[in-house]
Amino acid sequence: MRFRGRVWKLGDDINTDLIISGRYKYDITDIKELAKHAFEDLDPLLHEKIRPGDIIVAGVNFGCGSSREHAPLVIKALGVRVVVAESFARIFYRNAINIGLAAVECPGVSQAFEDGDVAEVDLMRGVVRNATRNIELKFAPWPPLLRRIYMAGGLVNYIKSGGKLE
Amino acid sequence: MDEASTLTMAQKIISERVGRAVEPGEIVAVKLDYVMAHDGTAPLAIKALAELGGKLAHPDRVVLVIDHTSPSPSMKISNIHSSMRRFAREQNCVFYDVGSGICHQVMVENHVLPWMIVAGADSHTCTYGALGAFGTGFGSTDIAVAMATGSIWLKVPESIKVVLEGRLRDLVTAKDAILTLLRAISSRGAIYKALEFTGSGVHTLSISSRLTIANMAVEAGAKAGIFPADEVTRMFLEEHGRGSGFRELSPGERAEYLDELELDLSSVEPMVAKPPNVDNVCSVSEVEGVEVDQVFIGSCTNGRLEDLRLAARILKGRRVKSGVRLIVGPASRNVYLKAAETGVLSVLVSAGATIIPPGCGPCPGRHLGILGDGEVCVSTQNRNFTGRMGNPKASIYLVSPATAAAAAVTGKITDPREVV
């Protein structure tokens, strides 16, 4: 599984309130509608600028805060297929893979990219490449269980197709 | 088991469940004692469950709570609540409607026991570690699978040992202790790990205080924040009619920890987490004098009787400063009733407080105290992120109930010891 796309670079400790605010998530059940408020308190126009296929590169502790699955859901609804970060908060990390958004933990990534660079992510080989600056970073591939869940198209599909939790 | 002496509390609980000694880093599937979701997370879980066939493995172990937007502030949310009620009726699961309280408080008052493993669709499920249980938060899809199968997968965490010594001084609270700890280890200090609290200081802390500390373990990124189950735990369970469920829990004598830190409770000062991050912590003295528009005393962190009583001690015979709004949210109906019966509520109301229904109140930012542009709120809740209380142009300072009550009296961030 490989992705190539324009990078939107975000900082450290991007919490789930910044990804999707609590003032919207209780009322709006349509994720595409909700995605119009994605990252609003970080940059009110960011959701309009992000295009399908784009890649988010972030610092440490991405997705910290609440357990709201709306956070990876709105990112996926904007067309982002992979988030590469120095590290993730654990609930966001699981949620992302469970709903079919690739979350890749890659130390050094925030130093290797600038906003607007083109990234190539190879999930199986465990390589993130900055195609603009020709920098290559390696990351530890997912454990087999996470890989199976992701390849099934998320946790619901994985369980429906008879997948086991170990 | 012999290996028990080298196991952390997290390892002990998970090992017992899977029937063999587990090592940190292992991925295991565990059977769950309870699966919990609330009105912020249940709707997505119910939707995912429908795709999985819509059946609960153990209806009596699934708990739904309406607390985040309770009572409903909008038609859309009312319809979401209706669908939760219908689901609970059809599935015959455990259901707590509007007014019952915050999910975590309801869980510790009625369900959680030491050695249990609980999965909650809320990041603050780590609160249950106060009773010696392994509680941790998940998203709605994981919770749907947990509802359908009765199990969940998890990675056995490495643990960080937090040795608590001494005793908190008067008007300094468990909130100040956990804020001190967050300053030391930061919001990333325990990602994927469990915090385990040990040391003689643990036994000086009430369950209410332990709940405050365990609740905020996730603010360091932790998967769980676990206390030993001791005499204090047994007393709490007896008071709540569940004494027979008590079992002692403590780490193995030679338990292996990733890291160890110490906190002398007697040296803790009143602390504040400044906006917009929970680990942006300093002492109250460093921000003393910051003017305040609203004060909130409540939430799953600090909405218990001990917290309300402490606030009442400071507010007794005093008035909330003109121009300041004091909002008090009891964490559960049980807390509300006890606060009424013991006269705590009348002290708070006489001082000028507005009491809101048991529930999350203004903390998640949808109703009951949304801030205006440029306003400052001093709150006993656990998060101060931009926009958290509904307005990205407002600022939130996190404090103890004593410091919050002091701010309500003076209209400024104030060391509570200067007011009493």
Image (spheres, rainbow, N blue to C red):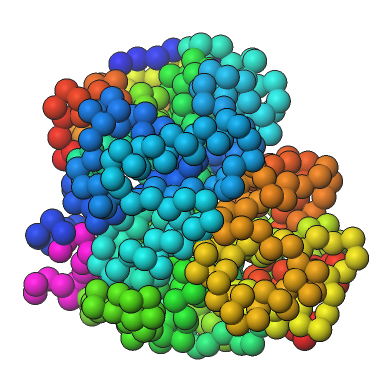
- How far across and down, in percent of the image, does residue B352 sit? 80, 69
Q: Nearer the viewer, residue A2 or B108?
A: B108
Q: Farthest residue toward the right?
A: B322
Q: Nearer the viewer, residue B71 or B366?
A: B71
Q: Report whether B261 appears left or right of B314.
A: left
- How far across and down, in percent of the image, does residue B179 sit? 59, 66
Q: Nearer the viewer, residue A31 or B382?
A: A31
Which image quarter: residue B249?
A: bottom left
Q: Does the magenta stretch include residue B10?
A: yes
- How far across and down, in percent of the image, does residue B48 sit? 33, 29
Q: Report whether B187 appears left or right of B35.
A: right
- Measuring 81% from the left and 45% from the top, which residue is drawn there? B372
- How far across and down, in percent of the image, does residue A129 sit? 43, 20
Residue B363, compared with residue B90, is above or below; it is below
Residue B372 visible to the viewer? yes
Residue A164, compared with residue A81, is above or below; it is below
Q: Give the range drawn in magenta.
A: B1-16
Q: Report whether A161 appears left or right of A114.
A: left
Q: Report whether B283 appears left or right of B118.
A: right
Residue A61, compared with residue B216, is above or below; it is above
Residue A14, compared with residue B377, is above or below; it is above
- Measuring 66% from the left and 58% from the top, which residue is drawn there? B356
Residue B157 visible to the viewer? no
- Measuring 53% from the left and 56% from the top, which residue is drawn there? B99
Q: Where does the N terminus of chain B fall, quadrant-wise?
A: bottom left
Q: Is residue B258 magenta?
A: no
- Measuring 77% from the left and 86% from the top, which residue is drawn there? B420
